[in-house]
Image (cartoon, rainbow, N blue to C red):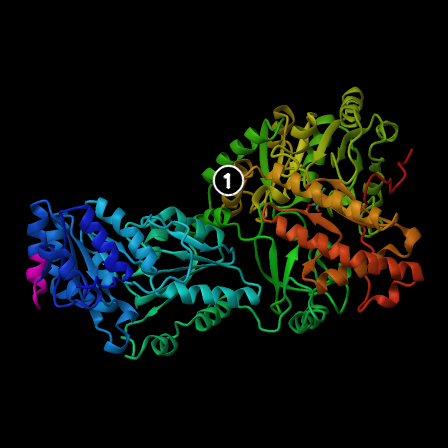
Amino acid sequence: MSTPTLNAYEQALKDLATSDENVVVMTAENRAALRTLPPLLGHRFIDVGIAEQTMIGMAAGLALRGRKPIVHALACFLTMRAYEFIRTDVGIGNLPVKLVGGVPGFLSDGNGPTHQAIEDVAIMRGIPGMKVFCPADADDLGAALPALMRDPAPCYIRYNANPSIVKHPLLGQPEKIEVLAEGSDVAILTHGILIAEALAARELLLAQGISARVLNVRMPKPLDEATVLAAARECELIVTVEDHFLIGGLFSIVSELLATHAMRARILPIALAEKWFTPAMLPDVLRSEGFTGEQIAQKISAKLGRVSGANRVALNAADPTITRSDALWARAKDLIPHGSQTLAKGPGQHVGGVAPKYLARGKGSHVWDVDGNEFIDMTMAVGPLVLGYADPEVDDAIRRQLDAGITFSLMHPLEVEVAELVRGAVPGAESVRYSKTGCDVTTAAVRLARAFTGRDRVACCGYHGWHDWYVSTIDRNKGVPEATKELTSTFAYNDLDSVAAAIDDQTACVILEPQVFETPKDGFLAGVKKLCAERGALLIFDEMWTGFRLAVGGAQEKFGVTADLATFSKAIANGMPLSALTGRADVMKLLDKDVFFFTTFGGEALSLAAAAATIPALRARKVPEVLAARGAKLRDAYNALAKELGLDWTRCAGYDARTMVSFDAKAGNPLELKSFMQQELIRRGVLWGGFHNLSWAHSDTDLDYLLGCYKQILPELARHVAKGDVKSALRGTPLEASIRPIGGASTKPRKA
Ligand SMILES: Cc1ncc(COP(=O)(O)O)c(C=O)c1O
């Protein structure tokens, strides 16, 4: 007699039976998959005829006597007709019976579905103690069987012995979710025969610039929770794809898990919603029910709101379409003076007619404008987004707080909790107060210094906000009373002589950004501190940019020099409006009564919740270290490139986490050069205002891409510079000058 040819599953069963004499293979008139086994297994192959309940009862009995039954039936009979027997005899009894459902889900194609075939996961996972295994193919099934047999728990196996289409990274470890492909925009969770469609969808999405992670959730119960939670945290959208009813299967499983962890995620379920599928052969079923790779990809890109034809992060054929941006601008320009509430975000800082004006959405380091164009964002909301857009950890904290309330009639516990966090992070923060904006706290600090010293004059350096005391030092200072203007003088950064000259016996404080783009010279910050102490003025560090970025404790931690007062905002709450005033307790104590500094939203809880999540995350994710490493690499690579190209009129300077590209006037009008760079970067899907405001979410891929763009654009720019005409290479109107002083230039001579 010739040896029958075994399929992979039969071979796996035979091997199991050969190696363990307690293994028994059972079937109830469902021999299709097992045709060759009876003669090979002899008395250890049991066919009970059309009597599923009997078979389950019998399997339970055999299991009680030490046997290990592997039971086969159509999915429907296992899950419904024998349900009560499975539940009571096998499940509650916790007996080592493995139940193999023969034609689950879409595998029942031409036969037509039965309700049990497309709610089998729901039913089986409802049975106590029952594991559920949904293999992707014959390899996954065969390799898992030994592990499942070693495990004494009962298990339902959703039979699928189709040929393998993928290399399994975790073959033989059925309890683990396999990440079959990496991606960060979308996570597609699926199992069984739909793995192939999910992988096909991934390829199509990739062509649209959407990266999809594909997870083989082969064991929905018990679930490999960590992998699902990581996907929900790291991806913008979770997609569950299952040939099962919407209720009770993968979608329900994932939703239950997220609810248990009080986590929210955008979920797109692709399942059979309260209807059976139309009987047909598998390819037709997939198409008519919307489960092909192409249809899955379409549903995902529609859910993500990707606009077809919009520009992507790539060298696009044309500048982005900005029709919606322009339409909004037309409505705004006579209604909202200047249009923008933040100078650096406004139209004057972007090439008119080329750059988008309004952004709609951000995730990580990428943003999408209102016309659907995607960009890597190098501006990052001008500083706040130190972790990146829509950081799941921070956003979850905000959502949890949102459920409890935004702002209250009494103080909120977070005011205390965040103050403790700030005190723990920031050197010299003996006391802490909050407000909403950077200039709120720089102004409060100046008022405090005036109250503490009994003097009125202020010496400053750099930018500190829009309030009178500072704005008197810049060109746009209409509306500031002359008497106020006379009280503020300026000094040059890194120039101790100019600091000494700026302080007189009426100087209440010296306020400066401890570092902007120039590195403090050895002894400069300590020298300023010493001068202040000698002359009876307070030292205030404006740490709006350096705080929670240069180091978690800002410049005071980094340089080991502590000021009397320090002010923070931007990165402290990853995008939520919060600022903090910190410093010496004896000075801050004046805020108890003598100095008035109160505001309605000062203790607003959403921003505090964001800060309470952000500050520990900065440490846990080593954010300052990550930003420093990536930023230094970017700055040094830019300068190396400029050198290699022989361009001595452009450089990148600043501290690692925040650098600026500048253009020297010897090459032409710096604003035109910057405009050209911006226009070409926008064509390539990079939103850029001259700064590298790095966030934790900027990946090496983002930054390598940006460097690749510089490599293409700088030689082009050099050609225009050589011709002495950059302007005619602009496709829109150039940038306007900003008022922001850079470095340490003195903008107003101190009055005698
Ligand atoms: C160093 C510095 N101080 C103060 C401010 C003012 O902060 P805000 O714009 O939040 O009022 C800024 C804003 O960019 C800043 O960079």
- In terms of depth relative to the viewer, which is nearer, 53 or 591? 53
Residue visible at 34% across and 76% down in the picture: 285
The quarter of the picture where residue 502 lies is: top right
Q: What secondary structure is found at the residue carrying circle 1?
A: helix
Image x and y of residue 654, in percent = 76, 41
- Residue 85 visible to the viewer: no
Residue 52 higher or lower than 175, as above or below: below
* Residue closest to the far front: 1
* Residue drawn 85% across the image and 44% down it: 482
Residue under label 1: 612
Q: In which quarter of the image is ligand 1?
A: top right
* Observer able to see residue 359: yes
Q: In this view, does 605 lie to the left or right of 291?
A: right
Q: Image height check: is 306 above or below 112? A: above
- Residue 133, magenta (yes or no): no
Q: Quadrant of the C terminus?
A: top right
Q: What secondary structure prevails in the magenta region? A: helix
Q: Which of 324 and 13 is in front in this view?
A: 13
Residues shaded magenta: 48-57
In this rendering, position of residue 71 left or right of residue 238: left
Q: Residue at x 8, y 67 (%)?
A: 49
Badge count: 1
Q: Where is residue 457 in the image (x, y as percent from the top left)?
A: 80, 33
Q: Judge whether residue 50 is colored magenta.
A: yes
Looking at the picture, how far across and down is residue 729, in whole percent?
85, 66
Q: Which residue lies furthest to the top in this view?
A: 534
Crowding at dot 1, Cα within 10 Å, few <14 / some 14-19 / many 20+, comes out as many
**Residue 379 position within the rendered picture, expressed as x and y whole percent measured from the top left:** 68, 52
Quarter containing the N terminus: bottom left
Task: Tell me the kind of residue under disc 1.
Answer: Ala
